[in-house]
Amino acid sequence: MSFARRLRTDAKFRLVVLLVAGASALTTGVAIAGAVGLIQGPRSGPETTAEPTPTPDPTPSVAPPTTAAVAASFSGWSSESPSAGVSAEGGAPADGAIALLLDARNGAASLSQPLEVQPGTEYSISISARAAGAEPAAVSLNIDADEPWTQLIETDSDEWQEYSWTYVTGSDQSILNLRLTANAESGSIRVDSARAISPDGADLVQNGSFEQYEAARQLTNTSLVMPTHQAMLGVAWQAPLLAWSIEDHTGAQLKSGEVSPAGGISVLPLGDLSQGFYSATIADPAGTAEPISTTFMVLDKDLTKRDSVDDRFGVMIHVDRDYYSQSGAIAAQLGFGTVRTDVRWAHVETTQGQYDFPENLNSGIHDLESNRLDVLPVSAFRNPFYDNNRVPSSDEALAAYASYTDALIAQYGVNAVEIFNEFNNPPVNNSACGPTPECYMQLLRANANRVHESHPGTLVVGPANAHKDDAFLTSLYQQGALDYLDVVSFHPYDYDYGDNKGAEFLVESLNQAHDRIKEYNNGESKPIWLTELGWSSTLVKTDELQADYLVRAQAISLGNGVERFYWYDLVNDHLNFLDHEGNFGLVRRASDTVPTFQPKLAAMAQAILVSKIGGKTYSAQDELNAVSYSYAFGSGESTTRVAWATSPTTVSFAAKSAVTLTDQYGAVSQLEPVKGKITVTLDGQTVYLDGTLGPAEVVE
């Protein structure tokens, strides 16, 4: 089956209240924190001759959310939702401090409670409900008895409304099962004040206002990438008092305060924070548990709402690993247009000659496509049924590998497929033939012929070398590989580990790569995709340097003829921050207390890069000196320059009007010309200059 790219639309919400004779089950405040102090901390950025004046923030059109919800179990109620979707929500209940939130976007969400009733007796049943999204909510009351009885109410109101009915029990009915269920393809609804009143005025529903619940101590945010003016942190913590503080990326404390959680859920409204990268710490002053710490981002642009995505910006993921679950949203929020993932042959052809794509792979690809991400699968690596589980080299195994690649493309309808990964790297390649160009050539030929015949619109990408390995590429070209490859890919990890000299080696490397292709392709170039390159934050010692190199590598690559750049990788592969291989990610893995992806500085740098040059083609490079770089993207007044220097250098640009300067982490200022020039001191952190600029020069 093929997954078509689509966004979820026309979601309909349904709350079903079921009273079922003889069955068991039913479903089911937030304190808003104020800042105690506001401390203005230093901001890092370039030195300028003109006095920068802060760009005024736009007037907020929306306020931060005032509610927060956490997955919970409720006293007196039984859950019938193995896929979760049942939460305690604080901030805007109809009664008390907590309401029930039923979220059915990932499957039906349900709670139930059996009530002891008297036969032949009239009861008053009531609930309060409100829509939890932009779409209408349908509220249905069903009684499964000898004569089924149904009431249906629809609402699109975000205000609480009470619904009430009377129900007369059957002549032999002693149990009434009250069931709350949200059934919908996507959507959610809030419920509160569930009551069943007997003739003597007694309420039979236990915990009908959902105040008694159990939940993990954690942040409640589903994303830590938030729009400007809508930033907030939700906290579930049963404590009488919590202290919190917010720091910017330099470590300067900006805000702090205390909050008394109402019903065990608090909201920290942070809508006054400007675009930037921040960290937060929430603690119980009584010391009953370890503090909760996290990072988060605030962005002026919602990169998921662009008219079109930019597939020059890509990232590597491992879609079938559990810690990548639902990672499509964070990739889209950071501005990526394409993702690369390995799709392992051994996981699909588990019965010889049959292809069974596992559900975690299917759902992962679907998640990516739902977030408007183009998918570049790597057809990898070997299968136990062929060549004794070694990388294919026999005719039979090569043909089987090509058949798998064919099935992979048919399954997901992808625009391109990469043939193997780092064939020239012996730890990856256990082929009986060996890791030589000749051995890759036979594998490439078998796959490319099948792809071009069966899927003529699908690009064949390779060889995905470890390092650039010019000798390997040259030998492939001499054997005619360029006749089979639509795109040349390699992974230029050609920096000296630990030298911290940055990404500038790519300039010479990419120019040489283009020249080599032309040498063996009748003077014509071919597209180059860097399908892996990254720096571990452990290798370069700091998250700051990882962010620096990320921006510089992409600016250099796009300015030197690379069509796509895939950062390695999206999510840290390990929790140990000292593990080299495990810290290439842009975000950290979810944890018990922060159950969503936590951005690193490089994530913020990536989002700002895309927000500044996304959709703008490379146009020119300013001539400066050997340590200074300035690449221009776009044209005319929409031109954006990406500029930095590997050692501090002051440069000037001719300018007739004000220029907008944005630093690597999104702080914005205006530079007014002085005597027809703006002057900026560049260092290893990239700055973006928006506006019409004339010739540039280094200031001695």
Image: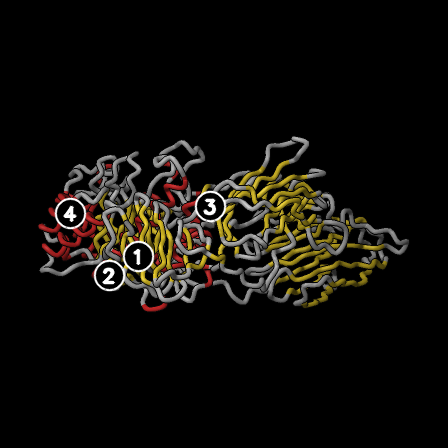
CA separation, marks 3 and 2? 41 Å
Residue labelled with disc 4: 473
CA separation, marks 1 and 4? 26 Å
The kind of residue tagged 4 is: Leu
Q: Earlier in the sequence, mark 3 or mark 2?
A: 2
Residue 345 in view of the camera: no
The front one of 502 and 318 is 502
Residue 557, label in figure: none
CA separation, marks 3 and 4? 36 Å
The front one of 140 and 192 is 192
Q: Earlier in the sequence, mark 4 or mark 2?
A: 2
Q: Secondary structure at mark 1?
A: helix
Q: Nearer the viewer, mark 1 or mark 3?
A: 3
* Side of 34 relative to 554 (left or right): right
Q: Quadrant of the N terminus?
A: bottom left
Residue labelled with disc 3: 599
Do the numbered discs 2 and 1 sit on residues whose CB atoms are within 8 Å? yes
The front one of 273 and 284 is 273
Q: Secondary structure at mark 2?
A: helix
Q: Which image quadrant for residue 487?
A: bottom left
Q: Earlier in the sequence, mark 1 or mark 3?
A: 1
Q: Earlier in the sequence, mark 3 or mark 4?
A: 4
Point 65% across, 53% down: residue: 67
Q: Residues within 10 Å of mark 2 (few under 14, many from 20)?
A: some
Residue labelled with disc 2: 454
CA separation, marks 2 and 1? 9 Å
CA separation, marks 1 and 3? 32 Å
Q: Secondary structure at mark 4?
A: helix
Q: Nearer the viewer, mark 3 or mark 2?
A: 3
The kind of residue tagged 3 is: Pro
| Residue 616 point in image, percent of width and height | 33, 63
